[in-house]
C-alpha cells in the first residue's frame, strides 16, 4: 500500500468514531499535494447538508488525534469539508444513492471522438457503469476508463 493510501486509511479509522457519534457520514479522505503543500482532507456529509460549524467541530476533535498519533511524516494542512454538489461517485453508497439520476462521465480517452457523456445511471458493478443516454441508448463504461463520474446538474 502506498504512503498516501496508508495515511488515508489510518485517517478514516481515526475519524470514524467521531463521525458516528455526531451522526455524520464520511464521504472520502484524500492526501494530496497542491502548490507545494500537502493536504489531508476529510469530506463529510449528513442529511440536510454539512455546515461550517460541523466541519469545525470535527476538525477540532480530529486535530487532537492527529497530534497525538503523529503518523504522517510530511508537514501538512488538515481540512474538513463538505463534498459539495458536484462530488464524484467513489463508493458503493454513492452509486446506490445515484441510481436513476442523471450523471456526467468524463473518460481518459475519447470514445467515438467524445470524452464527455451524460445519461441516467441504470446499472453498475465492480468494473462497469451503464447509463441510458437522452436518445434511449444504453452505454457501458469500464470504471478504469472513467476519469470523473458525478451527478450532472443544469445550472
Image (cartoon, rainbow, N blue to C red):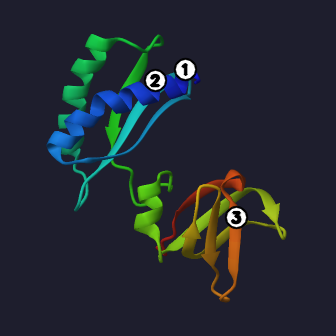
Q: Secondary structure at mark 1?
A: helix
Image quarter of residue 122? bottom right
Q: Which residue is the site of mark 3? A: 141
Contact, mark 1 vs mark 2 (Cβ under 8 Å): yes
Q: Residues within 10 Å of mark 2 (few under 14, many from 20)?
A: some
Residue 26 against residue 64 in the figure, above or below? below
Q: Earlier in the sequence, mark 3 or mark 1?
A: 1
Q: Quarter holding the N terminus?
A: top right
In three-dimensional space, the C-alpha distance between marks 3 and 2, rounded to whole angstroms, equals 30 Å
Q: Earlier in the sequence, mark 3 or mark 2?
A: 2
Please name the residue shown 65% across and 61% down the image: 128
Q: Which residue is the site of mark 2? A: 7
In three-dimensional space, the C-alpha distance between marks 3 and 1, rounded to whole angstroms, equals 30 Å
Comparing 51 with 108, the one in front is: 108
Residue 34 against residue 51 in the figure, above or below? above
From the viewer's perspective, tell me whether residue 136 is left or right of residue 19: right
Comparing 76 with 98, the one in front is: 98
Residue 44 against residue 151 in the figure, above or below? above
Q: Examine the rendering and report whether any part of residue 126 can be seen.
A: yes
Please name the residue shown 57% across and 59% down the image: 149
Q: Which mark is residue 58?
A: none
Residue 147 against residue 121 in the figure, above or below? above
Please name the residue shown 34% across and 30% down the image: 13
Q: Position of residue 147 (x, y in %)?
A: 66, 52
Q: Secondary structure at mark 3?
A: strand
Q: Which mark is residue 3?
A: 1
Amino acid at each position: 500500500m502506498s504512503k498516501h493510501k496508508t495515511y488515508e486509511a489510518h485517517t478514516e479509522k481515526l475519524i470514524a468514531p467521531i463521525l458516528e457519534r455526531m451522526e455524520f457520514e464520511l464521504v472520502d479522505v484524500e492526501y494530496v499535494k497542491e502548490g507545494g503543500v500537502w493536504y489531508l482532507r476529510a469530506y463529510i456529509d449528513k442529511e440536510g447538508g454539512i455546515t461550517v460549524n460541523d466541519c469545525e467541530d470535527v476538525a477540532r476533535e480530529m486535530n487532537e488525534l492527529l497530534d497525538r498519533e503523529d503518523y504522517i511524516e510530511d508537514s501538512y494542512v488538515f481540512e474538513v469539508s463538505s463534498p459539495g454538489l458536484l462530488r464524484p461517485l467513489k463508493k458503493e453508497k454513492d452509486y446506490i444513492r445515484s441510481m436513476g439520476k442523471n450523471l456526467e462521465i468524463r473518460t481518459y480517452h475519447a470514445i467515438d471522438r467524445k470524452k464527455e457523456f451524460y445519461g441516467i445511471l441504470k446499472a453498475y458493478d465492480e468494473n462497469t457503469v451503464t447509463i441510458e443516454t437522452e436518445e434511449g441508448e444504453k452505454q457501458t463504461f469500464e470504471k478504469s476508463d472513467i476519469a470523473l463520474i458525478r451527478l450532472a446538474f443544469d445550472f
